[in-house]
Image (cartoon, rainbow, N blue to C red):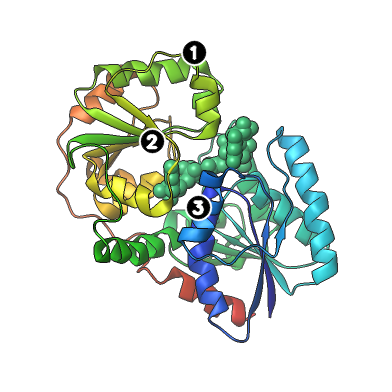
Amino acid sequence: MKIVSIVGARPQFIKAATVSRKLRANPSIRELLLHTGQHYDENMSDVFFRELNIPQPDFNLGIGSGSHAVQTGLMLQGIETVLLREKPDMTLVYGDTNSTLAGALASTKLHIPVAHIESGLRSFNRRMPEEINRIVTDRISDILFAPTQTAVHNLDHEGLVNNTCFSGDVMYDSVLYYQSRLLNDPDQYQTPCIPEKYLLATIHRAENTDDLSNLKRIFSAFSRLPFEIVLPIHPRTKKILTGTIEIPSRVHIIEPVGYLQMLKLTFDSLKVLTDSGGLQKEAYFIGKQCITLRTETEWIETLHDNWNIVTGTDPDLIVKAVNMATPDAPRKKDFGDGHSADIIEKKLLSL
Ligand code: UD1
Ligand code: UDP
């Protein structure tokens, strides 16, 4: 079976690391990796390939940044050229970025079946570009790998249950796999603040970066918090922040870090504040309370017992949430058993 896996953005490299490792261990599968080039900075792309031993991409389209239409259009052209040449039996797309949408659309128009990993997520907020990407990708994909039962339910609601396979979450597989590497090498990754005394924050969503008032409200909340805050900054946020908002002295802005350093920062943090989808889940897997700087979350399983608190950008709500007691209720096993990649591999081979 010849598979072309399509990636382009940071969270997709992390997901692909786990799935690719599994697929490439099977002699009856030949996987080719196509990188659209959506993310291209060393610390947004190369670091993940190097650190997570992801095979070098067989194709890098080098598309880079642009408006949604320009970026997606260029990807469609580039992906189509590769698929026409390689004629794979199937393509694999991940998550909800423009690379996901372009990969699924280019493939299905060539009658090449598409498998979508992390399918069925819905925020029910169509102003999010990711929500459009998810809805369209799920509608045109042939196999929908759902990470949670909520995702299965969403797909069922949209009449897509016959294409759905509950796989669990490959990001849970990743945390389990790589945390043992961290434990084996405790001195390699350091945290810049005293463990358990700092908050870990990330911000990159369009709603929080393109709307300066939202970004200002987040930083206003940060200035009221009695904790050091470590903030690995996404390049999108860095561009907007520079010169527009005064950074409180307790906020330590650092360049984006590799996945293992990020896991270490999460393990050592007191709590996590984020608008990232992936980091909300990692906080939950690792047992850190998350404050979600959005008005809704797709990962509703993480909300029980206040493990995840959705505050949006209201400074009062953010401060209140950070001051809440850290939960001690057990976390549920809603994201599979850490063997999602095995389930995906088996299902693909059964087709
Ligand atoms: C994209 C995804 C988002 C995902 C995020 C993961 C879409 C619509 N959005 O958002 O779902 O959560 O990736 O991080 O696909 N930039 C750089 N260097 C880079 C990459 C980006 O400087 O290596 C800057 C550019 O100014 C660019 C901006 O960041 O215009 C936004 O990048 P883009 O890939 O369009 O979207 P993200 O915000 O990264
Ligand atoms: N991440 C990372 N370095 C960073 C920030 C995030 O490795 O500096 C990881 C994070 O641990 C998670 C993934 O990137 O695994 C989440 O990606 P991101 O927040 O960019 O996108 P989203 O998940 O919101 O689509």
In the rendered structure, find residue 47 and report the number of the disc placed on it.
3
Q: Give, as a three-letter code, the residue at label 1.
A: Thr
* Coordinates of residue 127 in the picture (x, y in percent): 59, 30
Residue depicted at 64% across the width and 41% down the height: 132
Q: Residue furthest bottom?
A: 27
In the image, residue 186 lies at what x, y percent? 24, 58
Q: Amino acid at mark 3?
A: Val
Vertically, is 221 above or below 149? above
Q: Secondary structure at mark 1?
A: loop
Furthest residue in direction front, as rendered:
188
What's the residue type where badge 2 is placed? Thr
Q: Which residue is mark 2?
A: 274
Question: Quadrant location of the N terminus?
Answer: bottom right
In the image, which is nearer the foreground, mark 3 or mark 2? 3
Residue 155, which numbered label? none
Query: Relative to 241, is 332 above or below?
Result: below
Q: Position of residue 206 (x, y in %)?
A: 55, 29
Instruction: Say whether mark 3 is within 8 Å of ligand 2.
Output: no
Mark 2 residue CB less than 8 A from any atom of ligand 2: yes
Q: Which residue is mark 1?
A: 244
Badge 2 crowding class, 10 Å Cα cut-off, few under 14, some 14 to 19, many 20 or more, is many
Q: Residue at left 58%, top 67%?
A: 55
Residues under labels 3 and 2: Cα distance?
Answer: 22 Å
In front here: 191 or 197?
A: 191
Q: Residues within 10 Å of mark 1 (few under 14, many from 20)?
A: few
Query: Which residue does the image show at 39% across and 65% down from the upper left?
Result: 173
Q: Secondary structure at mark 3?
A: helix
Is disc 2 placed on a helix, strand or loop? strand
> Is residue 330 found left or right of 110 in the rendered image?
left
Front label number (2 vs 1) = 1
